[in-house]
Image (cartoon, helix red, strand yellow):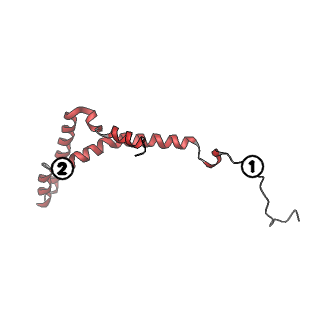
């Protein structure tokens, strides 16, 4: 009967520790570092996006060029709008203007909001 392969073998019971149920701490650290990195890298792009959404003066020229069937002219106008927006943001406060409002968002997330 001891040699029968169909009889289930009971594993030795041992006391479970909290670390048996939770992944390695390194995963939590890696998640935190990746979150900080992604916020820092994408913050200037997000700020530029919001600025371009709010600014509509130069975009009308690009839209009109695209409607008239001139894609190269529309592309130039779009790039000019992007470059002008970058210059405006830089003139408003340098590198710090690209991260405006991000500190308060990070503090809000730390508080569990």
Relative to 22, say whether 96 is above or below.
above
Q: Which residue in the protein does label 2 denote?
A: 78
Q: Which residue in the protein does label 1 denote?
A: 14
Foreground residue among 89 and 103? 103
Residue at the (21%, 40%) spot, across then down: 86
> Which percent across, then down, holds residue 5?
81, 65
Foreground residue among 71 and 23? 23
Cβ–Cβ below 8 Å for labels 2 and 1? no
Residue at the (36%, 41%) spot, across then down: 41
Pointer 2 local density, CA inside 10 Å: few below 14, some 14–19, many at least 20:
some
Please report whichever mark, 2 or 1, sits nearer to the chain's N-terminal start. Answer: 1
Q: Which mark is residue 100?
A: none
Q: Quadrant of residue 102?
A: top left
Number of callouts? 2
Residue at the (60%, 47%) spot, across then down: 22
Q: Nearer the viewer, mark 2 or mark 1?
A: 1
> Which percent across, then down, holds residue 71?
16, 56
Relative to 61, say whether 105 is above or below.
above
């Amino acid at each position: 009967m001891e040699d029968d392969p169909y009889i289930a073998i009971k594993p030795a019971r041992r006391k479970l520790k909290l670390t048996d149920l939770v992944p390695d701490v390194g995963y939590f650290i890696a998640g935190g570092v990746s979150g900080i990195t992604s916020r820092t890298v994408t913050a200037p792009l997000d700020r530029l996006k919001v600025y371009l959404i709010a600014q509509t003066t130069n975009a009308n020229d690009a839209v009109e060029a695209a409607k008239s069937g001139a894609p190269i002219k529309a592309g130039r106008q779009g790039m000019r709008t992007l470059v002008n927006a970058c210059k405006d943001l830089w003139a408003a406060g340098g590198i710090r203007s690209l991260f405006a409002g991000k500190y308060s968002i990070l503090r809000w997330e730390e508080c569990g909001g």
